[in-house]
Amino acid sequence: MRPRLARHAGWATIDLLPSLRNLGPLLGLVVVYLLFCVWAGEAFYSGFNSVTVLTQSVIVTAGALGMTLIIVSGGIDLSVGSQIALATVVVAKILETGASPAAAAAGGIATGALCGLVNGMLITRLKLVPFIITLGTLLIFRGVATGLANEQKIDAPITWLNSLLAKFPDPPWLLVAPGVWLTIILAVVVALGLRNTVLGRHIFAVGSNENTARICGVRVERTKLWIYALGGLLTGVAGLMQFSRLTVGDPTAAKGMELDIIAAVVIGGGSLSGGEGSVTGSVAGAMLMAVIRNGLSMKGVPNYVQDILTGAIIVGAVAIDRWRHRAAD
């Protein structure tokens, strides 16, 4: 973000806060990682555990890429966990018919895109806030997933899709799971698109001030449709990764994961007021949560303590965001 001039006590000063803010999540990730290296020891920073942390973060990171677009535009999507579950069911269903793994993967990703498009259409047509719409579709998509699966898990044939999140990739020269590389590529593409395309600029414009964006010629409703469709597509990728981890289509999967995905974006500097956020920050936020959970699990900290700590981090991130906006007003 380009530094901007600000007036203070009669002097023109360079406001570097936005640039420093972008580095905050990365610095936080480094600090937390180093603290766990000291506390948990060699077992934590070993090559095997580092690969494990990267693999564990893939699903939330992929979902956070789509959520970044949505939150930057001033929206929210509470249905992403249900979309992920529905995608796993669709992938398993397609494989069950004997179709190719590529067709199954495409079907799962397209399912996410379709769910996102449905959310976008309801939000733009009904003129209701995204929180209410996606709270409703959270239940709808989960119900569709449960109905398609006949209220049970769907076993699918073993294919190369099951190796997307393998801790020991084949071939070994990949070093990390194919899903990790795919997520990195998607992160680069989304970051470039958000910063260097017309759609990306429109996303920031809509999130900053929707009325002003409309006056300036931005087709707000169409932009929102694109935002939620692309967000759903990336959530479909997260669903494909979830299937790879579970190896089954599970309509009960990813319950509560929408909170982790939203938290990753908020911790990464995304503002729930819209107009602010970055892919780098969201990825750092997802990695930060994965590092904390992995380190605490390694030290035998109970799950309920992990949930309390994660919730405290989310509240702190939102509180800092609100304080920052009040200070800017």
Image: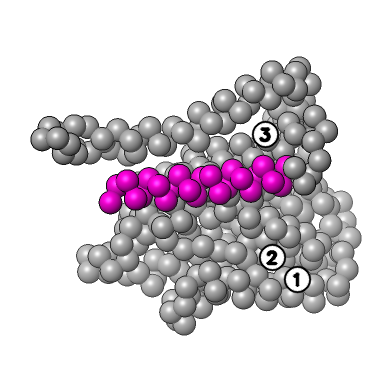
| Membership of 315 in magenta stretch | yes
Which one is earlier in the sequence, the residue at label 3 or at label 2?
A: 2
Residue 8 spot, x, y in % from top left: 17, 36
> Residue drawn 72% across and 66% down?
86
Residue 37 spot, x, y in % from top left: 69, 20
Report the Cα–Cα distance between label 3 and label 2: 25 Å
Q: Nearer the viewer, residue 286 or 91?
A: 286
Instruction: Determine whether, in the image, residue 96 is placed left or right of residue 254.
Output: right
Image quarter of residue 225: bottom left
Q: Closer to us: mark 3 or mark 2?
A: 3
Amino acid type, label 2? Ser
Q: Secondary structure at mark 3?
A: helix
| Membership of 106 in magenta stretch | no
Report the Cα–Cα distance between label 1 and label 2: 8 Å
> Residue drawn 39% across and 66% down?
223
Looking at the rendered structure, the number of numbered marks drawn on it comes to 3
Residue at which label 3 appears: 291
Q: Is residue 193 visible?
A: no
Say whether marks 1 and 2 touch (CB < 8 Å): yes
Instruction: Determine whether, in the image, residue 95 is placed left or right of residue 14.
Output: right
Amino acid type, label 3? Val
User: Which segment did they paint magenta?
Assistant: 306-329
Which numbered disc covers residue 82? Answer: 2
Q: Nearer the viewer, residue 296 or 176?
A: 296
Say whether marks 3 and 2 touch (CB < 8 Å): no
Q: Nearer the viewer, residue 161 or 35?
A: 35
Which one is earlier in the sequence, the residue at label 1 or at label 3?
A: 1
Q: Closer to us: mark 1 or mark 3?
A: 3
Residue at which label 1 appears: 145
Q: Closer to us: mark 1 or mark 2?
A: 2
Residue 22 spot, x, y in % from top left: 42, 36
